[in-house]
Amino acid sequence: MAQTKKKPTKGKRPTKGVEPAQEKKPGKFQKVFFWFIIPLLFASAILLIILQITGTNVFEKAKDLAGITQSADKKGATNDNYEQQIVSLKSQLQEKDAEIKMMQDQIDEQRARAKKVTIEKKRLNKEIRKLKSAEHDASATIDSLVATYEQMRPKSAAPALVALKDSEAIEIMRRLKTETLAAILEKMSADDAARFTRLLAERTGN
């Protein structure tokens, strides 16, 4: 019997010594592109669509953001100006406090002087009252002596007046009646009468 020949199997047989081709793995750039850039672009596109639907102007929003930044910068500059003004005002306040203290010291000094003047014034008034009282007492005494000499006889009154101090005698003689004084002077010596007459004239002229 004739042997049946087997038909060769379709398809390529693996060649000896040749390894199958290995699949290439994606690089880092491809990973970044697929995982970050594409989702970011997709999200940006969706955001633009939403903003367009809501009628929001992207460029105006960008200007507003820029304006906010500038406003923040201006606010920072304004704060610096405020701080400088505060420092200046504090310095002026310290100067005013120094002036007030100096004025207060002057006022205290003037009050102390006024107090001393008031005390001295009270002392002088007291001395004046004493002198007035003494003068009143002396005047009362002289009045009493004048009344006594008016009642005395000229012969007795003349030596009594000569025995007194000239100032006391003149003060009494000034208050005597004219006729009484004339009678007393007649009973004195010529020298005493001349002296008292001269003193009376000087006292009357003053």
Image (tube, rainbow, N blue to C red):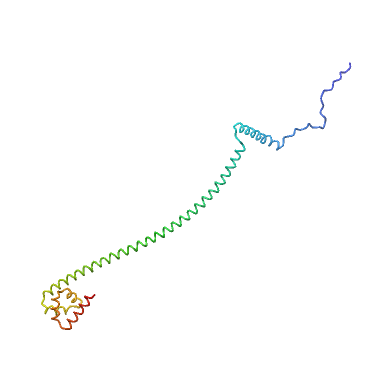
Q: Is residue 51 left or right of residue 16?
A: left
Q: Residue furthest right?
A: 2
Residue 36: image location, x then y, percent: 66, 36
The residue closer to the viewer here, 48 or 20, is 48
Total labels drawn: 0
The residue closer to the viewer here, 194 or 41, is 194
Q: Is residue 16 left or right of residue 102?
A: right
Residue 185: image location, x then y, percent: 15, 80
> Would you place residue 122 above or below residue 21 in this image?
below
> Would you place residue 176 above or below residue 84 in this image?
below
Within the image, what quadrant is residue 8 found in? top right
Q: Residue furthest top?
A: 1
Residue 104: image location, x then y, percent: 39, 59
Within the image, what quadrant is residue 166 found in? bottom left
The residue closer to the viewer here, 72 or 156, is 156
Within the image, what quadrant is residue 69 found in? top right
